[in-house]
Image (tube, rainbow, N blue to C red):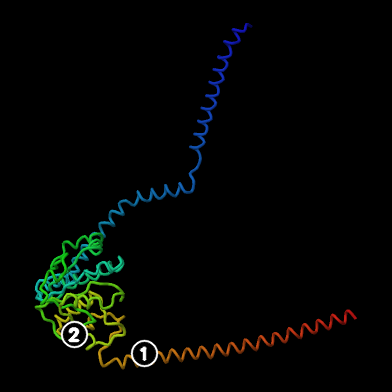
């Protein structure tokens, strides 16, 4: 065979080999596919298929349950006529309330003295004041002055509905720019003046500051700087407290609302003051201190009993240790004697 014929035969042979390889590969793929189709489902696949079948089978049941729940809620709403009437009564009480001409001002000019955490606390206290004033029998004229800075930013971010608040006057100006100085009375626990009555023609200012006593006397100093009247609530005349007479903004606000309703300072104080303040009526502090003394005596008795029991147990432990040491010494002596006898 000539060299030309051999060269022509080579491409033909290579083509035949390629076709054969493709056919073998195709056969392998078909066999793998058939084997995969015949393989049983895994445990996870069977569970998934079963859940899907159950979901489809229970479709009508779920629909029926939704209808039943909807009907049940409708019946509950109808059965709650008393609660609805109570809520309606509250609204009627709000409409039938007799507004007071007294003005209560929360001074928010201390914004720069507070960290963000305390600003958020002040925001919550203001929310409480607003809610309580809306429900009060004699709602006051509520003012929020020097509104801006961190407080306004926090309210914009977390309480966008404040712009729709009713029966409140929110001002960016300072309170002495909004009202006459002769009408202002700054409420501060550092004032030597004690209120006995509320003058409803006045505007009483509450310092909007949450500082954990870091700025003691600052509201009293502010009142003196502005040259306005100042006073403190008659807390010391009716209440004996374990802590300082510094109250949260909402507590002062709510006490004044309670006094306008009850016209009794002591009842107003004990309606609002939290238990953690340890407040007791004046004249009864001796009883409270006696109870505390009894508790301390009982605690000291229990402590002394524990100390005696600990001493007794300590003595027993010492005796046991000494006996153990003597026994170990006796054993070592007997072992030494036995060793010497063996050596001899």
Q: Relative to the observer, which residue lies in front, 258 or 9?
A: 258
- Which image quadrant for residue 130? bottom left
Q: Label 1's element?
A: helix
Mark seen at residue 292 = 1
Q: Which mark is residue 193?
A: 2
Q: Nearer the viewer, residue 36 or 265?
A: 265
Residue located farthest toward the top when viewing the structure as drawn: 2
Give residue 148's quadrant in the image: bottom left
Image quarter in which the C terminus is found: bottom right
Q: Is residue 317 visible?
A: yes
- Taking 268 as reference, is 17 left or right? right
Depth order, front residue of 308/47: 308
Residue 309, above or below 89: below
Q: Residues within 10 Å of mark 1 (few under 14, many from 20)?
A: few
Horizontal and vertical percent for residue 57?
35, 50
Residue 80 screen position, x and y as percent: 19, 69
Instruction: Please give the name of the residue rendered at 27% of the width and 56% of the height, measured from the top-left corner.
Output: 66
Q: Does the image show residue 72?
A: no
Q: Is residue 256 shown above or below 69? A: below
Against 99, residue 196 (above or below) is below
Q: Residue furthest right?
A: 344
- On the rendered image, what quadrant is the N terminus found in? top right
């Amino acid at each position: 065979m000539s060299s030309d014929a051999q060269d022509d035969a080579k491409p033909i042979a290579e083509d035949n080999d390629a076709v054969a390889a493709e056919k073998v590969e195709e056969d392998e793929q078909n066999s793998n596919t058939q084997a995969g189709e015949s393989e049983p489902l895994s445990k996870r696949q069977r569970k998934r298929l079963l859940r899907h079948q159950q979901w489809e089978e229970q479709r009508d049941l779920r629909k029926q349950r939704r209808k039943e729940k909807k009907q049940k809620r409708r019946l509950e709403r109808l059965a709650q006529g008393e609660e609805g009437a109570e809520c309606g009564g509250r609204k009627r009480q709000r409409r039938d309330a007799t507004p007071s001409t007294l003005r209560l001002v929360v001074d928010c000019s201390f914004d720069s003295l507070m960290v963000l955490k305390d600003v958020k606390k002040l925001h919550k206290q203001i929310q409480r004041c607003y809610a309580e004033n809306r429900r009060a029998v004699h709602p006051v004229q509520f003012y929020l002055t020097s509104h801006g800075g961190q407080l306004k930013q926090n309210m914009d971010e977390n309480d966008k509905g404040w712009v729709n608040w009713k029966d409140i006057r929110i001002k960016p100006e300072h309170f002495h720019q909004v009202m006459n100085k002769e009408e202002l009375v700054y409420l501060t626990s550092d004032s030597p003046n004690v209120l006995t009555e509320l003058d409803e023609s006045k505007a009483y200012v509450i310092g909007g500051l949450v500082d954990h006593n870091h700025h003691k006397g600052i509201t009293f100093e502010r009142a003196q700087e502005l040259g306005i009247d100042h006073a403190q609530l008659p807390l010391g005349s009716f209440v004996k407290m374990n802590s300082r007479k510094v109250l949260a903004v909402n507590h002062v606000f709510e006490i004044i609302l309670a006094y306008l309703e009850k016209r009794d300072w002591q009842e107003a104080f004990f309606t609002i003051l939290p238990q953690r303040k340890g407040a007791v009526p004046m004249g009864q502090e001796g009883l409270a201190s006696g109870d505390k003394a009894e508790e301390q005596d009982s605690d000291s008795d229990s402590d002394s009993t524990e100390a005696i029991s600990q001493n007794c147990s300590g003595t027993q432990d010492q005796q046991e240790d000494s006996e153990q040491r003597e026994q170990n010494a006796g054993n070592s002596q007997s072992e030494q004697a036995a060793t010497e006898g063996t050596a001899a």
